[in-house]
Amino acid sequence: MLRTHAGGDACVPVASAICHGPRTTIEKEILRNQNAFRKNVKQNALDYAFQVEAMKLENILDGLHVSLTRRRWTQLFTVFTRILLACGFIPPSIKKILHQPFTMLPDSNPVGHYFNALYETGFYYEFIGWAQLAAAILLLFPRTAHFGALMFLPIIVNIAVLTTSVGFVGTWVLTILMSLAAIWLVAWEYDRLKPIVFQTRAERTRSIPYQFISIPAFFAIGGAVMAFLWKLIRLGNFSNYLNIGFLLVGIGLVFGFVVAVHYRFMRVGNLETGGDELI
């Protein structure tokens, strides 16, 4: 259908008038829906591409894990490694639990200085011993060996870095080998740990109205309240609490924005618990 101008010498489509004229509410809603659809399509395409790459890596690791864990010699080696590492942790853990010095080196020696200072930390010294003993005991039982491996690894890596840093002659080689053995034990539990790496939660967090404004504003108000309380109790004895207030408000805004971004992209786990619904 054509519409003729007043002069009668030109015709333009009605659709042109609609496009160039003011948009109606329906047209605006259609455009919003189209933009939202394009964003969803783009996001789904990116998610699909990421899932494809993850599946490739997942298949490679699955095949490697199966080929290793199905061999008798690797199974025996894993059992041997578990028992050996457990035995390596039990004696030093007992000394710490009984609060006995780990070494007799003088403070002039970097190793002796460190362990003598560690010995003076009170129950923290004993806590390290209990942690080592717990990791060792967990490694001894097949049912709990995966917990033992996960607990053993950070402890022995910390010890390896320490002994290498202070130049503990000979011991640093042993602790590095123990760290590699602990990595083997964690890798052996790949089938248990796989869901943490490759399974993606499908559900998103529930939206908050104007969350990129409301959440930073909430923490900014919290910063202002904190500044008022600081001034009220004279915390820190600052000369200008007004500047402190502005600083805390700014920190609250930045902190709140980071919280809002994290909340926006966070996924939520969902367990089937008999149809319970989120309230």
Image (tube, helix red, strand yellow):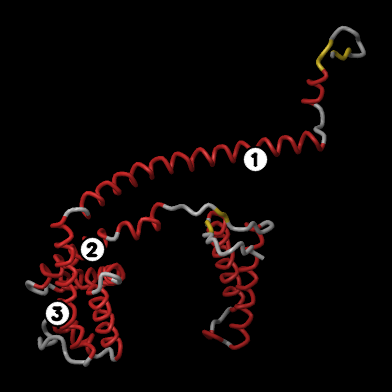
Q: Are marks 3 and 2 in contact (CB under 8 Å)?
A: no
Seen from the viewer's position, the closer of residues 272 and 164 is: 272
Rendering quarter of residue 27: top right
Measuring from the top left, give residue 3's x and y in whole percent.
87, 14
Q: Amino acid at mark 1?
A: Ala
Pointer 2: what residue? 185
Rendering quarter of residue 23: top right
Q: From mark 3 to mark 2, how far is it between C-alphas?
A: 32 Å
The label nearer to you, 3 versus 2, is 2
Pointer 1: what residue? 36
Mark 2 crowdedness (10 Å alpha carbons): few <14, some 14-19, many ≥20: many
Residue at the (84%, 11%) spot, across then down: 11
Of the image marks 1 and 2, the number of the one nearer the N terminus:
1
Q: Is residue 29 left or right of residue 110?
A: right
Of the image marks 3 and 2, the number of the one nearer the N terminus:
3
Residue at the (26%, 58%) spot, across then down: 187
Q: Quadrant of the N terminus?
A: top right
Disc on res. 197: none
Measuring from the top left, give residue 205's x and y in whole percent.
59, 58
Rendering quarter of residue 146: bottom left
Pointer 3: what residue? 110
Q: From mark 1 to mark 3, how far is it between C-alphas?
A: 63 Å
